[in-house]
């Protein structure tokens, strides 16, 4: 009889569980949203509810929410990944605590407080007035994971890269960054989900989004409106998390998948 390696069994089991989750998560999100929308549209709505619970308004709010999330993601990627790379260089060690401290403050501070402070200082309104402070709130996971991902690369691999004639930039591009991609994507996934949740606060600076639906339902005491807005936000967060999981699984180096 051949003994079964318990490590391989556990690993294959976890892989199957992950594949099942990747398959079921978007279905669950879509079913949840569809069920609530069917319930809402088949409920006898009053004049106030009809103004908000219609296809045009819901699609507009959802699209605005997606745009805010995309804007936050672009800002986080453009700032956090290059900054994380720079902070892993030996000559930047002295300033690492400063930047990590600032990023930690951004995530620890209440998102609504960061948005309001940004508005008070700039007096801006609209999408970017929400996206910029929310990017500050969402910065830390990508920044930290970029640094950790690069720092965990085996020094012998870096030495081997230099030994075959690669420059420091060549080693970074062809060795360190590819090996750090899984952790960077994991941090980005966390930031994306955080961005979807905090984007509901964009309504306070006229940034649009599903926060408008939720706030309207709360203000006029209409549970149907409130529940619809909240469910759409949850469904969008689940779909974004699913996309992040797909990116983690299929965009990393083949040998590390």
Image (cartoon, rainbow, N blue to C red):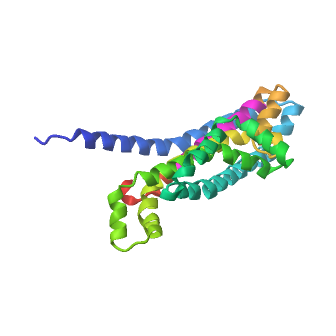
* Residue visible at 86% across and 30% down in the picture: 46
Q: How many labels does the image show?
A: 0
Near-viewer residue (36 or 103):
103
Near-viewer residue (50 or 5):
5
Range drawn in magenta = 225-244
* Residue visible at 67% across and 55% down in the picture: 75
* Residue visible at 78% across and 32% down in the picture: 225
Q: Where is residue 209 in the image (x, y as percent from the top left)?
A: 76, 44
Q: Where is residue 198 in the image (x, y as percent from the top left)?
A: 69, 40
Q: Does the magenta stretch include residue 227?
A: yes
Q: Is residue 236 visible?
A: no
Q: Examine the rendered structure and indicate whether residue 213 appears above or below residue 192.
A: above
Q: In this view, does 109 lie to the left or right of 225?
A: left
Near-viewer residue (134 or 79):
79
Q: Is residue 121 visible?
A: yes
Near-viewer residue (23 or 211):
211
Q: In this view, does 181 lie to the left or right of 200?
A: left
Quarter placement of the N terminus: top left
Magenta: predominant secondary structure element?
helix
Q: Where is residue 6 in the image (x, y as percent from the top left)?
A: 24, 38
């Amino acid at each position: 009889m051949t003994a079964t390696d318990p490590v391989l069994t556990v690993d294959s089991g976890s892989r199957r569980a992950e594949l099942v989750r990747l398959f079921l998560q978007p279905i669950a999100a879509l079913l949840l949203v569809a069920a609530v929308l069917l319930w809402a549209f088949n409920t006898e709505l009053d004049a106030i509810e009809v103004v908000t619970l219609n296809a045009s308004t819901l699609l507009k709010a959802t699209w605005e929410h997606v745009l805010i999330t995309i804007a936050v993601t672009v800002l986080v990627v453009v700032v956090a990944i290059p900054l994380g790379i720079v902070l892993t260089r030996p000559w930047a060690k002295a300033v690492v605590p400063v930047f990590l401290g600032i990023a930690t403050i951004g995530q620890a501070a209440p998102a609504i407080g960061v948005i309001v402070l940004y508005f008070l200082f700039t007096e801006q309104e609209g999408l970017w007035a929400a996206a910029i402070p929310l990017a500050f709130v969402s910065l830390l996971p990508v920044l930290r994971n970029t640094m950790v991902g690069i720092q965990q690369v085996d020094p012998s691999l870096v030495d081997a890269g230099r030994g075959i004639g690669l420059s420091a930039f060549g080693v970074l591009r062809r060795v360190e960054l590819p090996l750090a991609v899984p952790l960077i994507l994991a941090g980005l996934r966390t930031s994306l989900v955080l961005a979807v949740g905090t984007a509901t606060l964009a309504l306070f600076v006229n940034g649009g989004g599903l926060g408008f639906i939720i706030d309207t339902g709360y203000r006029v005491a209409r549970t149907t409106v409130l529940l619809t807005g909240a469910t759409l936000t949850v469904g969008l967060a689940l779909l974004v998390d699913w996309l992040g999981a797909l990116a983690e699984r299929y965009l990393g180096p083949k040998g590390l998948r």
